[in-house]
Image: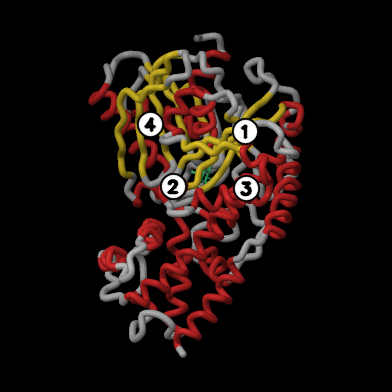
Amino acid sequence: MNEMKINSYLRVLRRSFDITYRDIEAIIADFHAEMARGLKGEGGSLKMLPAFVDVARGSESGTFIALDLGGTNFRVLQVSLNGKGRAKVEHTEKFVIPKSVMRGTGAGLFNFIARSIQRFLIGHVDPKGKRRLGFAFSFPIRQEHIASGILINWTKGFTATGVVGGDVVKLLGRSLEDYGIRNVEITALANDTVGTLAAKSYEDPTCDIGVIFGTGTNACYRERLANIKKIGPRACGGSKRMIINIEWGNFNGFMTSEFDRMLDESSNNPGKQIMEKMISGMYLGELVRLVISDMIRKKLIFKGRKAGFFRDGFTTEHMSQIEDDRSRGMKMAGRYLETIGVKKANADDLRVLKRVCRVVSRRAARISAASLAAVVTWMDPGVRRRHTVGIDGTLYERYPGFRRTIRSVLGGLFGERKKNIRLVHAKDGSGIGVAVVAAVAARNAGQN
Ligand code: GLC
């Protein structure tokens, strides 16, 4: 009896999370319309932000400091480029950003960054030597130049006050001064997707798309200058193309479920980043938690417990571990849940939980594939050319089945031509990539 009720609940859930090929065709058409609007500066859900840089040639060289800010961690790296397509991370250090800093004041955030840079310089490199620094800033920024950018709005968990509308390069520069760091010049600012594309393009000239499937999700690609109507004719270091940061996380042409709406309403940016809330690591765990809480209320899972029992702490990482546990009793998954206070889950509960995770993660992967297909077909409607897509982020790197689903949807859409789209993992692409961007900027300015 209960089994039947569970199955019928899951059937309805699956239907409301289903993304059919027909949906995908509609998503692609909508995506193209929004891309066109964004490039003309007519508003819409896709910001289509010019990055004021094109991909690398592979001949750029030099040593740079790179900052990578945007997820739960903040990283500082020293990267050297050998001029032959090889980038080497010479030193790297990771700093955990306390929630209080992410959600405090802008000054607090940039001082935290400046202090981390100071520690890095003292610990790893000659702290007095002159350095050029590339800043990977994983949020929407409006740029007029490669070494400046105005924060349009925060996304993901950040809300630090007094930064939106300000130039983040100036804000960081001020904090560096306050900490007496005068030998470091910020020469490039780029979104993490732009960094990822730059990093891959440094070693592979066929790379023309950069994607992040991590805490947040987004993509960038190479656009013809003539198509970027909103900035008029601009030189881009002698290149006829420029990278555009799509900010695709804000796309919203989807049917959403009641759980998506609940999640959105309780988020710190309601109505924004709708696609990101259906795809990315920051939100998938919460979506599952909302479904499970509903099932507990309907007495379909974790019998005898209150809905609040499955409270905070369930993350996309847990989903990933649950989907990974293929054993019969799912003992491993049970143990992971114990660590967040979900005690004594029985095998039946765990199996149902796994099915819910699957529904949510599968939709995420199908929407991801649809968006990627939209970008490829925007650049090359017949998918005749070869496209290498540099991808980074934990979801892509580690979530069981995520890559497979993306590949299979691309196959369903393009058949044999799918082999023209090569997906490659760009590990730590944004940090390395922003050093590449700084090197491209130096080359354009005639310094290298
Ligand atoms: C969010 C940010 C975007 C970034 C992405 C991945 O969507 O708005 O700029 O690229 O997360 O980190």
State yes or no: Cβ of the residue under disc 1 lies below 8 Å from any atom of ligand 1: no
Q: Amino acid at mark 3?
A: Leu
Q: Residue furthest bottom?
A: 1
**Local SS, label 2:** loop
Query: Pointer 4 and pointer 3: residues touching (CB < 8 Å)?
Result: no
Q: Considering only order in the chain, which callout, 1 or 3, is on the residue closer to the N terminus? A: 1
The residue that label 3 is drawn on is: 410
Can residue 397 be seen in this snapshot? yes
Quarter of the image for residue 344 reads bottom left
- From the viewer's perspective, is the residue at label 3 or at label 2 nearer? 3
- Is 425 on the left-hand or right-hand side of 129? right
Question: In terms of depth relative to the viewer, which is nearer, 19 or 37?
Answer: 19
Q: Amino acid at mark 4?
A: Ser
Rounded to the nearest angstrom, the CA distance separating label 2 from label 4 is: 15 Å
- The crowd level at tag 1 (other Cα within 10 Å; few <14, some 14-19, many 20+) is many
- From the viewer's perspective, is the residue at label 1 or at label 4 nearer? 1
Query: Pointer 3 and pointer 2: residues touching (CB < 8 Å)?
Result: no
The residue that label 1 is drawn on is: 387
| Picture coordinates of residue 68, whole percent (x, y) | 41, 35
Question: In terms of depth relative to the viewer, which is nearer, 336 or 177?
Answer: 336
Residue drawn 33% across and 65% down? 327
The residue that label 4 is drawn on is: 175
The residue that label 2 is drawn on is: 160
Question: In terms of depth relative to the viewer, which is nearer, 405 or 240?
Answer: 405
Query: Pointer 3 and pointer 1: residues touching (CB < 8 Å)?
Result: no
Q: Considering only order in the chain, which callout, 4 or 1, is on the residue closer to the N terminus? A: 4
- From the viewer's perspective, is the residue at label 1 or at label 2 nearer? 1
- Is 302 on the left-hand or right-hand side of 374? left
Query: Pointer 2 and pointer 4: residues touching (CB < 8 Å)?
Result: no
Q: Amino acid at mark 1?
A: His
